[in-house]
Amino acid sequence: MKKILLTTIASTLIATAFGGVANGKALSGNTTIWAWNINIPPLKSAAKEFMQAHPNTHIKISLVGGGDILEKLSIGLIAHGKGLPDALLMQDQHFNSFVGLYPRSFVNVGKMGMDKLANLFPVYKSNAFKYKSHMYGFPFDGGPVLVFYRRDVFAKAGVKPSQIKTWNDFLKYGKIIKAKTGKFMFGGNDDDSVYRIMMEQYGKRYYDKNGNIDLKSPRSIKVLKFLQKMNKAGILHHRAAGWNSFLRELTRGTVAAVPAGAWLEGNIETVAPKSKGKWGVMPLPVNGDGDVGSAAYGGSAFVMLQKSKNKALTYAFLKYFTTELHPQLVAFKEGLFPTLNKVYKTKEFNAGVPFFKGQKVWTEAAKAVKIIRPIDFTNDFHYAELEMGKLQSGVIFADGGNLMKRLDQAAQALHSRTGRKINEYK
């Protein structure tokens, strides 16, 4: 009797961890989930374990590129779900662009139980996938921003990372580094990544909380003028457009510092293996006027589609994958940055990273996660990103044109495309 009782308890615990039953019925059937490259190994590992616990289920994990997912999703939604999977991985900034426009095409997983689990994740992350106060996504990886810096370059210039507390310090010591080593402080071109990071430190981006176009806000102008100032000081490297150009900066050691999401750690190890021991991380500088030393850049979550014929299985697996410690530790070891809070307390997460000279990179990233401010991307994020990318390329890096005039043109272009009101300031 005792043995039977213990077996029953053990089975119950296993069932709970793996999603157990749905509406009193054992899980069965098939489900298909799309994700891109780095996410595939941990997903397949979790699927294998899940299917062992539920032998009547089959979980197919399909490799689809991030850009291809967006294209296929756009086409599929117009075709009422034709050709789409049961669930797919979606980047944070694209959530509103799809769920906001096609809410009936996505599953309200909050009502299925995720609303009660939102506190398992950082506030900024769970908020990013809410629609009308309900969770429409399973938070997964995140991109808390740190400044990755070259220890050897800083040392050669006689600069200590602890000296850089503010963005003005970043400018001041960037000049010293350029003068003494010939290295640029950081780089950029047709993307507005640093602008977005600095704006998010204030809890702002392209639109205000009411969805109005806010490109001409005092904060926005201050950040853009500061970027102009850094460019005129000669500390910005003008790289070519594209991801490959960005990676070349890392491999060639062109820049001394890179403000980026924590995911950059894995990229550096992959593309610049000979630089082992030469990298470190430090917190984002601040302006000290209401901003915080953190922001989010990158990150994703899983969303379920209404066309799914097996919502119970899809929900149970994704809930297991995103809310249980073991699969998230596997994902972490595969190079992803989990947004499940309890991962941050583990021994594995808080260990030193050999490539970074034993520095506890992830511990620093977890500190950043705690103070990231939630951002409403809106369903017109992409249009604003394009306009500000053109502005930065033409005005900040090329120094070609009046900033205020170009900002007004960008705001007007956004208004024409989206119909949103433009905030004006005196």
Image (tube, rainbow, N blue to C red):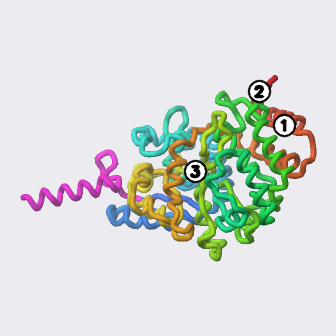
Identified at 6% across, 58% down, the residue is: 1
Q: Nearer the viewer, residue 202 or 379?
A: 202
Q: Nearer the viewer, mark 2 or mark 3?
A: 3
Q: CA separation, marks 1 and 2?
A: 12 Å
Whole-Å distance between the Cαs marked 2 and 3?
29 Å
| x, y percent for residue 303 | 53, 48
Camera-near label (1 vs 3) is: 3
* Residue 268 shown in magenta: no
Secondary element under disc 1, as helix, strand or loop, is helix
- Name the amino acid type tagged 3: Pro
Position above or below: 385 against 420: below
Is residue 18 magenta-colored?
yes
Front residue of 227 and 44: 227
The tag on residue 144 is: 3
Residue topped by disc 1: 407
Q: Residue furthest top?
A: 426
Q: Earlier in the sequence, mark 2 or mark 3?
A: 3
Span of residues in magenta:
1-29
- Secondary structure beneath dot 3 equals strand
Where in the figure is residue 385, as x and y percent of width and height? Answer: 75, 45
Image x and y of residue 366, in percent: 50, 51
**Residue kind at label 1, given as amino acid type:** Leu
Of the image marks 1 and 2, the number of the one nearer the N terminus: 1
From the viewer's perspective, is residue 94 above or below residue 255? Answer: above
Identify residue for label 2. 423
